[in-house]
Amino acid sequence: MRRAVIALSAFACFAASPAGKPLQTPISRIAFGSCLGQDLPQPIWKPVLAAKPDIFVFLGDNVYSDTDDEKRLRAAYAKLAAQPGFQQLRKATTILATWDDHDYGTNDSGGDFPAKAMSEQVFLDFFGVPKDSPRRQRDGVYHAETFGPPGKRVQIILLDTRYNRSPLAFVPDPKDPTDGGRYVANTDANATLLGAAQWAWLEEQLHEPAQVRIIGSSIQVVNETSGGEKWSNFPAEKKKLFEL
């Protein structure tokens, strides 16, 4: 099988499988989703469940809490947990997840969000990461999991583009935004999107044996024209990603 690397992003990890362990059978179907309002009806789960995915990947904004208050954050996740479709999904398939701004903190927030450590632990609690897992000690929710037998391995790498991100650079004149957005490239040589530890981890993951690699990002990877959040806001980081 030819090796392939696929990059996925959402516009805006832990493998919790029914058997309690990563799948060893070949993977044939993966579903992805993001931007899920916990206070709204969620009919999307019906077609997702009908597709019978081997794995479902949450790419961020899994709830819209926009808060630094732990009780409000846990309440938002509780509403998601109470959704009948989500309950069926948890029973039916393996779930992987990363986050984006609205479930991490506040709109477009990054490494300066003051409640990020609390938010991380709430996220890990919700997705069932054991209290003694090494993931509890990481600065961020980045995670990777490999599925399938030798020769048919699929590796899913989920990045955290929030916890360690440097401040965004704003357009000089907010009355004349570039391409309809608020942000321009941050050209500071020290600016980062992932942080040093996550970069080192990612490089290690790319040496793991796999025939297919899927890299998930909660912000847009390829886009260079929108003035919103994207990897191009940090051009040195984007260049580094593509050169790995």
Image: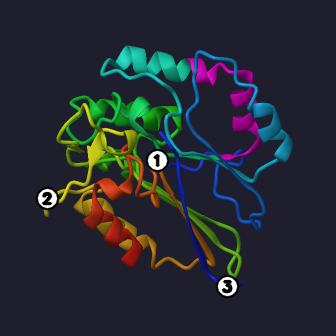
Q: Give me the C-alpha separation between circle 2 and circle 3.
A: 38 Å
Q: Give me the C-alpha separation between circle 2 and circle 1.
A: 22 Å
Quarter of the N terminus within the rendering? bottom right
Which quadrant holds residue 151?
A: bottom right
User: In this figure, which residue is indicated by the disc labeled 2?
Assistant: 188
Sequence-earlier tag: 1 or 3:
3
- Give the residue displayed 45% in from the left and 57% down from the top: 223
Along the viewing direction, whichever of 69 and 131 lies nearer the viewer: 69
Disc number for residue 218: 1
- Give the residue displayed 37% in from the left and 73% down from the top: 203
Sequence-earlier tag: 2 or 1:
2
Disc number for residue 161: none
Which quadrant holds residue 175?
A: top left
- Give the residue displayed 61% in from the left and 77% down from the top: 4
Identify the secondary structure beneath mark 2.
Answer: loop
Q: Give me the C-alpha separation between circle 1 and circle 3.
A: 27 Å
Along the viewing direction, whichever of 62 and 238 lies nearer the viewer: 238
Residue 123 visible in the picture: yes
Q: Magenta stretch mostly in which secondary structure?
A: helix
Q: Specify the amino acid type for callout 1.
A: Ser
Spot the residue most to the front: 176
Q: How crowded is mark 3: few (under 14 residues within 10 Å), some or many (20 or more)?
A: few
Along the viewing direction, whichever of 32 and 22 lies nearer the viewer: 32
State left or right for residue 158 relative to residue 227.
right
- Which region is colored magenta? 79-94
Mark 1 touches mark 3? (CB < 8 Å): no
User: In this figure, which residue is indicated by the disc labeled 3?
Assistant: 2
Q: Specify the amino acid type for callout 3.
A: Arg
- In reply to whether residue 235 is colored magenta, the answer given is no
Camera-near label (2 vs 3) is: 2
Sequence-earlier tag: 2 or 3:
3
- In reply to whether residue 90 is colored magenta, the answer given is yes
